[in-house]
């Protein structure tokens, strides 16, 4: 059985079968966002629970390209890529910050950066396309 311990504002430690992980939670009572194990989960007031919000933070579009979106309201802290750059699967492309936690946005596949649609210091909203990959 898993145990959950609050270790700070919006920060929880989950102990399960000898493994410890950290879960970050933000939002309001009617709209909670949790960041765990590199993924973002959302619970709406209606009780609708889902994995990454609509399209997740990486969505392969109809043309086969990836649009990486903000998983939750956050500030762009660091942009690590430029248009035209080749990236590898799992490489960190940019870092967001929400509720004093860093959220790395990583490449879902080997690709080339088509566009960077944000700037450092910018406050971005959920589902906003930040980086486009081909």
Image (cartoon, rainbow, N blue to C red):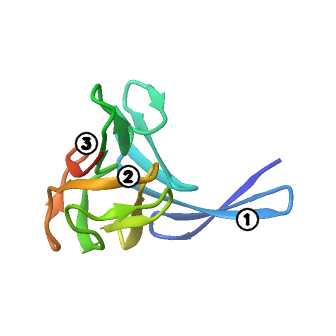
- Of tags 3 and 2, which is closer to the observer? 2
Check disc 1: other Cα within 10 Å, few if <14, some if 14-19, many if 20+. few
Label 1 residue SS = strand
Q: Is residue 128 left or right of residue 86?
A: left
Return the x and y of residue 74 as percentages of the image width and height.
Answer: 26, 61
Do we see residue 30 in this rendering? no
Q: Identify the residue at horizontal 42%, vertical 55% (top origin).
A: 107
Residue in front for this viewpoint, 81 or 76: 81
Dot label at residue 127: 3
Question: Tag 3's secondary structure?
Answer: loop
Q: Residue at x 45, y 53 (%)?
A: 110
Q: In the rendered image, is residue 118 in sight?
A: yes
Nearest the viewer among 86 and 60 is 86
Question: On the image, numbered disc 2 is attached to which residue?
Answer: 111
Q: Position of residue 123 (x, y in %)?
A: 16, 62
N-terminal of the pair, mark 3 or mark 2, is 2
Checking the image for residue 82, the label placed there is: none
Q: Which mark is residue 20?
A: 1
């Amino acid at each position: 059985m898993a145990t959950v311990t609050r270790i700070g504002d919006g920060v929880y430690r989950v102990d399960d079968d000898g493994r410890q992980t950290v879960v970050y939670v933000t939002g309001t009572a009617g709209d909670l966002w949790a960041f765990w194990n590199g993924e973002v989960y959302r619970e709406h007031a209606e009780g609708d629970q889902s994995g990454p919000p609509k399209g997740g933070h990486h969505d392969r579009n109809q043309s086969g390209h990836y649009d990486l979106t903000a998983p939750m309201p956050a500030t762009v802290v660091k942009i690590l890529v430029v248009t035209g750059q080749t990236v590898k699967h799992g490489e960190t492309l940019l870092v967001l910050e929400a509720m004093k936690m860093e959220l790395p946005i990583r490449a879902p596949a080997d690709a080339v950066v088509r566009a960077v649609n944000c700037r450092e210091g910018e406050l971005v909203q959920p589902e906003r396309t930040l980086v486009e990959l081909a």
